[in-house]
Amino acid sequence: MSLITVNVGAPSLERAQRQLCWLAERTEDVLVLTETKATAGSQFLAEAFSAAGYAVTFPDHAPGELGVMIVSKLASTPDPLGATLDYLPARAAGIVLDTADGPLRVIGAYVPSHDATAAKTERKKTWIQHFSRALEATASKAPLLLGDLNVLEPAHQPPHRGQFAPVEYDFYTGLTEQHGLADLYRHLHPDSVAHSWARRADLGYRYDHAHGSPTIRDSPCGCR
């Protein structure tokens, strides 16, 4: 089984039509699309994949709010986290896949960004707290795969000191210490310096992550 996360950038209808040409040719079984929005572009993607027979999970987005869509070639049922998250709920979407090894939970999360304003900083902090509680409340024996997050690991290179708050680093470490999830990329590439987004060539960030339960971490897998 393979999965990919793609930031679609709250697409216009014209951009979404071009994105669909690329996404429809992907070989992955599950597409986790982040930065979706209640606009014609995101709705077009949801309707096009649904019409083609994919299982589409696209939570209701409040006007102007960003979120997540999950598109699966495999049959799925809603993960309980979606109904449990009670603050900016469109920022996370979850499905349960019926695999040969039993149920697999897949959760996509698009953590709110923040800037220098107190309001956006508090908004991000509040969402992280509510998401962590929802993750705890829906914990089960089924293995879980979570991405893409929009946070950095504490030992990130370059350090980007002062740009991120303790609550953000605590959220990253809490996924392992509180929820038992491993950073799969870091587990497989312990010394690698890799970035998923860059403001310029010499200023990169590994914002995007795949965290998995121990059974996923210890099974044959790849992460890039």
Image (cartoon, grey):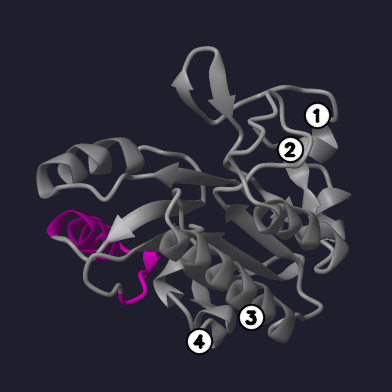
The reply to whether callout 1 and callout 2 are in contact (CB within 8 Å) is yes
Question: What stretch of residues is rendered in magenta?
Answer: 40-60
Amino acid tagged 1: His
Q: Residues within 10 Å of mark 4 (few under 14, many from 20)?
A: some
**Residue where numbered disc 1 is placed:** 189
Closer to the camera, 131 or 107?
Answer: 131
First reached walking from the N terminus: tag 4 or tag 2 = 4
Q: Secondary structure at mark 2?
A: helix
Closer to the camera, 8 or 3?
Answer: 8
Q: Secondary structure at mark 4?
A: helix
Residue 130's image quarter?
Answer: bottom right
Q: CA distance from mark 3 to mark 4?
A: 9 Å
Q: CA distance from mark 2 to mark 3?
A: 24 Å
Q: CA distance from mark 1 to mark 4?
A: 34 Å
First reached walking from the N terminus: tag 1 or tag 3 = 3
> What residue is drawn where x is 21% and y is 71%?
63
Q: Is residue 162 left or right of residue 32?
A: right
| Above or below for 8 versus 58 | above
**Residue where numbered disc 4 is placed:** 83
| Viewer-nearest of discs 1 and 3 | 3
| Above or below for 86 versus 215 | below
**Residue where numbered disc 3 is placed:** 134
The reply to whether callout 3 and callout 4 are in contact (CB within 8 Å) is no
